[in-house]
Amino acid sequence: MKIIEINDEPIALYQLLKFEALVSSGGEAKGVIDDGKVIVNGVVETRRRKKIMTGDIVHFGNESFTVKLI
């Protein structure tokens, strides 16, 4: 599982996907979230602005990420 380090929390889910280059744009991030392709802490997440905090686990595509505040 990859660790995503953030400088400030919370961070919106769509921003996390964009900043980590898992998608090419904010619009694409919003689209994959709307389509139910992102799982946060074991639950399909369709809220674009879901607040992601330290310890959250995000699944997207074939990858899993845990979030850590630095």
Image (spheres, grey):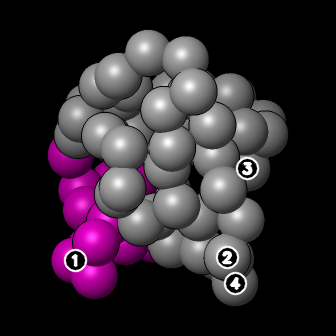
Relative to residue 6, is residue 8 drawn left or right?
A: left
Mark 3, Cα crowd under 10 Å, few <14 / some 14-19 / many 20+, is: some
Q: Secondary structure at mark 1?
A: strand
Using the image as rendered, state which of residue 55 and residue 36 is in the foreground. 55
Mark 4 lies on residue: 62
Looking at the picture, which amino acid does disc 1 mark? Answer: Val
Q: Which residue is drawn at the image coordinates 23% and 40% (left, top)? A: 50
Q: Is residue 45 above or below residue 70?
A: below
**Considering only order in the chain, which callout, 4 or 2, is on the residue closer to the N terminus?**
2
Q: Nearer the viewer, residue 61 or 5?
A: 5
Q: Are marks 3 and 2 in contact (CB under 8 Å)?
A: no
Residue 58's x, y, as percent?
A: 46, 64
Residue 10 image point, x, y percent: 30, 25
Asked whether residue 14 is in view, the answer is no
Mark 3 residue type? Leu
Distance in Å between CA atoms under marks 2 and 1? 17 Å
**In the figure, residue 57 lies in which quadrant?**
bottom left
Dot 3 falls on a residue whose secondary structure is loop
Marked residue nearer the N-terminal end (4 or 3): 3
Mark 2 and mark 1 lie on one chain; the one further toward the N terminus is 2
Q: Are marks 4 and 3 in contact (CB under 8 Å)?
A: no
Foreground tag (2 vs 4): 2
The answer to whether marks 2 and 4 mark residues whose Cβ atoms lie closer than 8 Å is no
Task: Quickly name the residue at label 3.
Answer: 22
**Cβ–Cβ under 8 Å for marks 3 and 1:** no
Which stretch did the figure color magenta?
33-47
Q: Secondary structure at mark 2?
A: loop
Q: Point out which mark residue 1 bears.
A: 2
Which quadrant: the C terminus?
Answer: top right
Could you say where residue 12 lies in the image, as x and y percent from the top left?
A: 35, 29
